[in-house]
Image: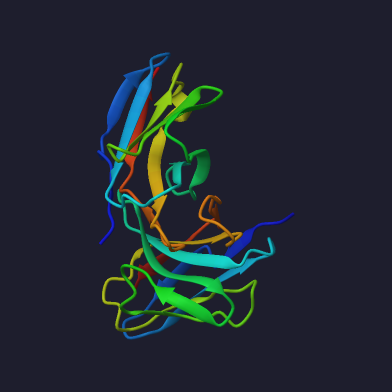
Amino acid sequence: QKEVEQNSGPLSVPEGAIASLNCTYSDRGSQSFFWYRQYSGKSPELIMSIYSNGDKEDGRFTAQLNKASQYVSLLIRDSQPSDSATYLCAVPTSGTYKYIFGTGTRLKVLA
Amino acid sequence: DGGITQSPKYLFRKEGQNVTLSCEQNLNHDAMYWYRQDPGQGLRLIYYSQIVNDFQKGDIAEGYSVSREKKESFPLTVTSAQKNPTAFYLCASSQGSSTTEKLFFGSGTQLSVL
């Protein structure tokens, strides 16, 4: 059973701070990694995708991937109250189209 | 506008009843998925389909059935064998040519037991 693990939180950060969200995965063959944001009662929306080791930046968001440690993270700079949501890490199992999601980390940005 | 349409938004099931959740996409995507989400939990894969007339079980397929007779449609039936069906059900699709592609999600169906 391939697994994707996240700390469920809640992770509370003050407005303007950096929020750091972490995800580990068990499938060493995984090549693609996705971060989704989900507001309560809504469907997930893609925030970032990353495929290579290192950092990938998009606006206030930075995804970091370390395949040797089987670890992917999402940094949110200048956190805003509107960033308060659950962040889901998704990893397709190698050789399949089976996208496995972590349990999600609930982020609270305090004004 | 291209997208994924799930219906109904809310659905109530009586004891012993089968119910079917609809999922239609006009994105011309090959792959489609059904996920279940319980309160405060992540998404768990029920079934997925990479091409028409073919589908695979996910991690929690027991008590559910699907069909993929048309590329744009992937309905999910929650059977009476699923004893705890109350959850938020999400349908998703992807191009299906590579796992570097993101999933597109529908707006979800909330299923409750009467």
Determine if residue A103 is in view. Answer: yes
Quarter of the C terminus of chain B within the rendering:
bottom left
Quarter of the N terminus of chain B within the rendering:
bottom right
Query: Would you say B10 lies left or right of A5 here?
Result: right
Query: Would you say B61 lies left or right of A54 here?
Result: left
Instruction: Residue lying at the far right in this picture: please name it.
Output: B1
Query: Would you say A12 lies left or right of A77 here?
Result: left
Residue at 48% from the left image edge and 47% from the top image edge: A44
Q: Is residue B104 above or below residue A58?
A: below
Residue at 39% from the left image edge and 76% from the top image edge: B13
Determine if residue B7 is in view. Answer: no
Q: Is residue A53 above or below residue B59?
A: above
Residue A11 place in picture, x, y as percent: 29, 29
User: Camera-side residue: A16 or A34?
Assistant: A34
How many numbered discs, if any?
A: 0
Residue A48 place in picture, x, y as percent: 50, 37
Residue B5 place in picture, x, y as percent: 61, 63
Residue A13 place in picture, x, y as percent: 33, 20
Q: Which color scheme is applied?
A: rainbow
Residue at 33% from the left image edge and 84% from the top image edge: B80
Q: Is residue B95 above or below residue A14?
A: below
